[in-house]
Each structure stands twice: as structure tokens, then as C-alpha cells.
Image (cartoon, rainbow, N blue to C red):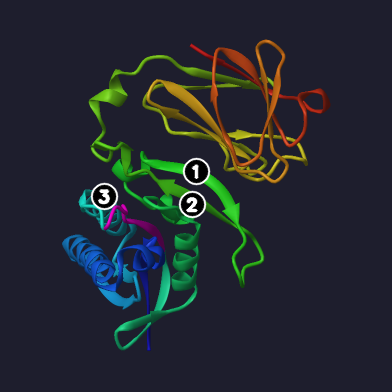
Amino acid sequence: MSDRQATVLFADVSGSTKLYETAGDAAALEGISGCLAALRKATEAAGGRVVKTIGDEVMAVFPRPDAAAAAAAEMQGKIDALPEVAGTKLGVRIGFHHGPVLQQEDDLFGDTVNLASRLTEQAKKFEIITSAETAAQLGPIFRRQVRPLHSIPVKGKSDEVAIAELVWRMDDNATVFAGSQKMRALSGALHLKYKGREIVRRRDDDAVTLGRDTACGLVIDDDKASRQHCTIERRQDKFVLKDHSTNGTYVTLEDGTEILLQREELTLRKRGWIACGQPRAHTEAVEFSCD
């Protein structure tokens, strides 16, 4: 049994169980087999190896995170381009993590494998999820497409694991890894002010995370706030806040209306305040303005 560093990826075909019920065994098997073949092809094209296929899930290994990221984006693009099966659009959930692995014959074992599998469980259909630790090891092209999320509990670990999404497309027609003219053409900026500090996010900037964790773009000094409480990202010509927290995010609009977000999203408009974990009246809020 050998020990080495590698990036482990799982890709799970979403909705396959229901497909067997609605499309019948023959049609479902043909559709899922087409998906698995596309996943294998994308793996090999990126320099990876398919370790094994478990039902409708592929486990693959790559020498480095960038190769796994390239394969994951290619997988999503290939599956998205496949025709519907009996009226059902198939998709994949992908998770990957880089770290030490134990290899016995052709199979892999260890904490890295377990965490990659757990990340796949966190992904939704058409999503790519990785650990924040692995995201930090990506090259600049892929790192620009990382959207920080929240932290998750993982069996066998005392601390929660911070996770991130690797955004592989802007919309239904455009992948984003090379950077798009549409993104560069956007104007406007988001201003955030908190406890004497101001940060600005413009059209090409990364998403910003608010929370207690010192790694966040804007660190919130409040016990009610989660470590990675919420993120604000640019989508088309809008700034969208997404809550990931335990206690919720309170957004006060310019007219004084206060909205509680609990694992929900809200488009930020004009000017207002963001309070993490409790109402604005009970804590110092982040002031935002969009121009």
C-alpha cells in the first residue's frame, strides 16, 4: 500500500433512480451509460484516471487540483449538452479534494477520498464543489471562478470544513473559465462599510464572504454570526447576497423594511444594511451601496 498526494473527484449522475421509474430500464440504462462514458472521456482528457464506477457515480483521481477542475468543467459541459432522456434532463453533482491518499492495487483510500465524497453530497445538480483548502491551490484562471460558501461538519473531523463552488458557466450558453466579454463589459460597484473599514467590489472582482472567520473578505465581530455567514457575488449586472448561516442574515432596505434571509438569496439594490445573525437594532450592521 503506497501513500501519495492526489486530487480525488466524484461525479454522481443526478436523478438516475427516478429515471428508471419514469423512462423504463432500457432507456434509463442507455442514458446513464452515455453520461458515464462522457465522464470517463473528460477524466482521461484532463490526464486523470477513473478509479472505479459505483452504480451511477464515477470516482476519478488526478495529479493536481487544476486537472480535476478542468475535468469537472468539461464533465458538466458534456452532460449538459446531452439530449433529454424520456423528457428528463440528466445532470451531475461533482466534488473534489486534494490531499494524501493510500493506494492499494488500483483503488484509493483515506481521508481525502472520504472528504471528496462528502463534498459531492453537498453539490446540487450541475454544481462543482471543492474544499476551500483545495480551491486555494488552484491556478489563477480557475481561482477566479471560485465562490466561497459555508462550512460543513465532516465525520471524523473536530472542525468544520470550509467549502467553495467552482462556477463553470455564467448562464446556459457561456462557460466562464476563459473570462467573458460580457463580464468585462459590466459597470458599477458595490461598497461595503463596517467598523471604519470600506471595501469595494467591481465588475471583475471575486465574490466577498462576510463572517467571523478571519479568512473572510469582511470579518464580522459578532458571536451571532457564523464563520462563513453569507456571500455577495456579481451576477450579470446585479449583486446578489446569499445566506449560509445558522441564525440568518437581516437585510434592511433603504425604506426601512427589514428582510430575514435563511439559506436564501436577495438582490441588493441602491443602499441598505446587512446584519449578520440578529436584527440591525441589536448589532452593528454592514452598510452597503450599489452604483
State yes or no: discs 2 and 3 in contact (Cβ < 8 Å): no
Q: Quadrant of residue 255?
A: top right
Report the residue at 31% width, 64% height from top. Answer: 23
Q: Is 13 or 244 nearer to us in this picture?
A: 13
Mark 1–mark 2 distance (CA, rounded to whole Å): 7 Å
Q: Which residues are magenta?
A: 86-97
Residue 171 image position (x, y, % from top left): 32, 35
Residue 89 is a magenta residue: yes
- Going from N to C along the chain, the mark reached first, 3 or 1, is 3
Q: Is 283 or 199 nearer to us in this picture?
A: 283
- Which residue has dot 3 on it? 80
- Which residue has dot 2 on it? 132
- Going from N to C along the chain, the mark reached first, 2 or 3, is 3
Residue extending furthest right?
282
Residue 210 is a magenta residue: no
Position of 30 with respect to 11 (left or right) is left
Label placed on residue 6: none
Mark 2–mark 3 distance (CA, rounded to whole Å): 26 Å
- Going from N to C along the chain, the mark reached first, 1 or 2, is 2
Q: Secondary structure at mark 2?
A: helix
Question: Quick check: 68 above or below 288?
Answer: below
Residue 119 image position (x, y, % from top left): 48, 60
State yes or no: discs 1 and 2 in contact (Cβ < 8 Å): yes
